Image (cartoon, grey):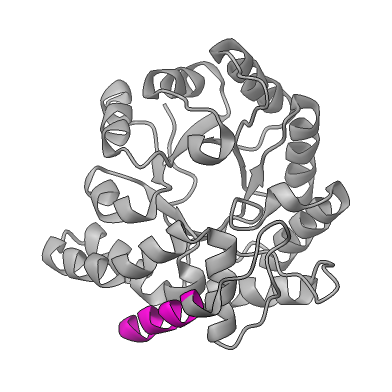
Amino acid sequence: MSQPQFAGIIAYPITPFNADDSLDLPALRAGIDRLIADGVHAIAPLGSTGESAYLSEDEWTAAAEASIRHVAKRVPVVVGISDLTTRNAVRRAQFAEQAGADAVMVLPISYWKLSEQEIFDHYAAIAQAISTPIMVYNNPATSGIDMSPQFIARLVREIDNVTMVKESTGDIQRMHQLRELSNGEIPFYNGSNPLALEAFCAGATGWCTAAPCLIADLTLALYRATQAGALSEARELFYKQLPVLNFILKGGLPTTVKAGLKLQGHDVGAPRRPLQPLSAEQTERLRALLKAVA
């Protein structure tokens, strides 16, 4: 079985846009610098928070290249790979590998319902095209595909460079099942913010989250406390930040994180339409939540 390539807080940077809706690469680089300076353990560009689904192919390529090059091996980079077609997912994975990504996180998405064999072959084709480690990303809320722990364990067992899992269903039992199915040998990463404490207690190797864009000190402190076995401190830290975690998740990650960054003095533009900026009322609610945890 696999050993984790990285552990801890894996932060999702947003993808900034200028007023004319073009990519703002200087702001992307500045956001990455802030996250690394705060102490996150890895950077994961072009996930859901990074609005990957709303980018043209040229924009995706530019954002991926800029992110990988700017991180410059200061921390590992895990590039999000998601496309309806296997062909383009392979192309993106190959580009990420050639640009220097340390791993890719593959989210299969579908218009037509995919069978397990079709999903398996999708991962196998990507794995055959690259040597970079692959993280399986299970997020049925955004992808329309829900992979069982048994199927995920099969992917890790039967495809050599599929080595780890991000589980985002919000079902803590899935994580326990992954541990049981592999005798604790499959590294798994929490992708559900409200489950962060439970996930670490269940043995999660890391937490993939956009929260460090706004509250990096709290997310990092929670990780340190769980790793030290200081569960009383960890509970206090978790429940302190939970209102923020819930708010940014329920309000839509690109929308809420971009609003929060603007409140903190970092104007990174609006989310790409059809997504809308946070309402004035909700922005004030977010302001109060961030002030409460400052």
Q: Nearer the viewer, residue 180 or 286?
A: 286
Q: Nearer the viewer, residue 128 or 254?
A: 254
Image quadrant for the N terminus?
Answer: top left
Image quadrant for the C terminus?
Answer: bottom left
Question: Where is 138 relative to 272, above or below?
Answer: above
Majority SS type along the magenta span: helix
Question: Where is 218 relative to 231, above or below?
Answer: below
Q: Is residue 184 visible?
A: no
The quarter of the picture where residue 49 lies is: bottom right
The quarter of the picture where residue 169 lies is: top left
- What residue lies at 83% left-to-right and 58% top-to-bottom? 62
Span colored in magenta? 282-294
Furthest toward the left, the residue is: 232
Q: Position of residue 223 (x, y in %)?
A: 31, 62
Q: Position of residue 280 (x, y in %)?
A: 54, 80
- What residue lies at 62% left-to-right and 48% top-to-bottom? 102
In the picture provided, is 138 more to the left or to the right than 229?
right
Q: How many marks?
A: 0
Q: Position of residue 171 (x, y in %)?
A: 31, 38
In the picture provided, is 143 more to the left or to the right than 28?
left
Residue 286 sits inside the magenta stretch: yes
Q: Is residue 172 visible?
A: yes
Question: Where is 226 relative to 216, above or below?
Answer: above
- What residue lies at 28% left-to-right and 39% top-to-bottom? 172
- What residue lies at 41% left-to-right and 78% top-to-bottom? 285
Q: Position of residue 286 (x, y in %)?
A: 44, 77
Q: Nearer the viewer, residue 250 or 197?
A: 250
